[in-house]
Amino acid sequence: MQFSERRTIWPTIKPYVMVFDGTLALIIFLILSVSALTMYSAGMDAPGRFEDHMRNTLIAFVVMWIAAIMPPQTLMRFAVPIYTVGVALLLAVAMFGLVKKGARRWVNVGVVIQPSEIMKIAVPLMLAWYFQKREGMIQWHHFLVAGIILAIPGVMIMRQPDLGTALLVLAAGFYVIFFAGLPWKVLATLTALGLASLPVAWSMLHDYQRQRVMTLIDPTTDPLGTGFHIIQSMIAIGSGGISGKGWTNGTQTHLEFIPERTSDFLFAAYSEEFGLIGNTVLLVLYLLLIGRGLLIAANAPTLFSRLLAGAITMIFFTYAFVNMGMVSGILPVVGVPLPFMSYGGTAFMTLGLGMGILMSIQRHRKLVQS
């Protein structure tokens, strides 16, 4: 292709490319590249898994692009409808949802979806809209109403039961409430009440959830049962050493000792093959992504944009921290994927949507300034 031809094509595609924040897009691309390498290796014994993962990556890219084009003002208009539809879908799950592995978390609406994943974006979107409407006159009772808005989907998701996703949704909403100016006295009171209610919360947990906590304390009490996941993942991480065993050479992975090695425990497979050096690279990439997200939030022009960008960024931090913590044996095992790494359909779309919203906020800030 001649130089003159490239100059002719660039003005045509430029509006579609420039919707992306260059720094954020580069970081995501690098994480997705690491993900593709790891998924190819971890999914070698699962036919079609790598191909499905790449398809999900492509769909997430399209979702991210669409969200990046959409102005934050449009997102504000959709906040209440998206939240309402999400709660309605959670009700549909409770009434006639699909049961898999003992949990009722999915509903068939032409395609099978997991509505709780939608609430990870819908809840912070709704709360950011709520506080934007009350900018400059936020009082204590507004935080109470926000807590109710957050509690409704949180309780519904817990009852599926899906404690891991419920905690992520509650965390996403809490970040918005915190960034909106939740007083430290209220935060301290809530923390004290939370600690005081732990015995009650413990009694309300399902047997398998209590067993996960006990397994965290001492996984060797049931090494072939509930402790198997943690023990095998820690063996895989430790056996990777400094530089790892090499791509596709992970013995724990390919001898199928790591359960869910393409989804929740993908980090164990990655650590075995790429070692401490690989882990350091991945941690740096996540820190760069979180840092860029917080910078976008700090420079956002409206309260809605700042709250939403800050919450979405902290959601990614929570995802990464919880997943790596549970795989490493320092947190209980919950169903939390590693962002842009673990295999998943709805979760991947949600992550793509979140990054697209961050890019939209950054792009339209520049448009406003210009």
Image: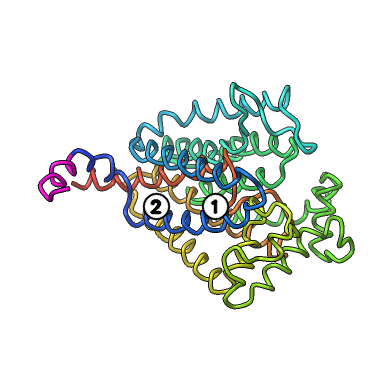
Identify the amino acid type marked 2: Ala
Q: Residue 303, percent across and down? A: 39, 44
The image's colouring method is rainbow
Q: Residue 201, percent across and down? A: 79, 48
Identify the amino acid type marked 1: Pro
Give neighbour class at mark 1: few <14, some 14-19, many 20+ (Cα, 10 Å).
Answer: many
Pointer 1: what residue? 339
The residue mark sitting in front, 1 or 2, is 1
**Magenta span has 313?**
no
Q: Is residue 176 left or right of residue 238?
A: left
Does dot 2 land on a helix, a strand or a loop? helix
Does dot 1 land on a helix, a strand or a loop? loop
Residue under the point 63% across and 45% down = 47
Give neighbour class at mark 2: few <14, some 14-19, many 20+ (Cα, 10 Å).
Answer: many
Q: Residue 190, percent across and down? A: 66, 52
Q: Residue 98, percent across and down? A: 72, 28
| Residue 297 marker | 2
Q: Is residue 116 above or below residue 298?
A: above
Question: Start and end of the magenta stretch?
Answer: 1-11
Q: Nearer the viewer, residue 141 or 199?
A: 199
Q: Is residue 68 left or right of residue 34?
A: left
Q: Quadrant of residue 113?
A: top right
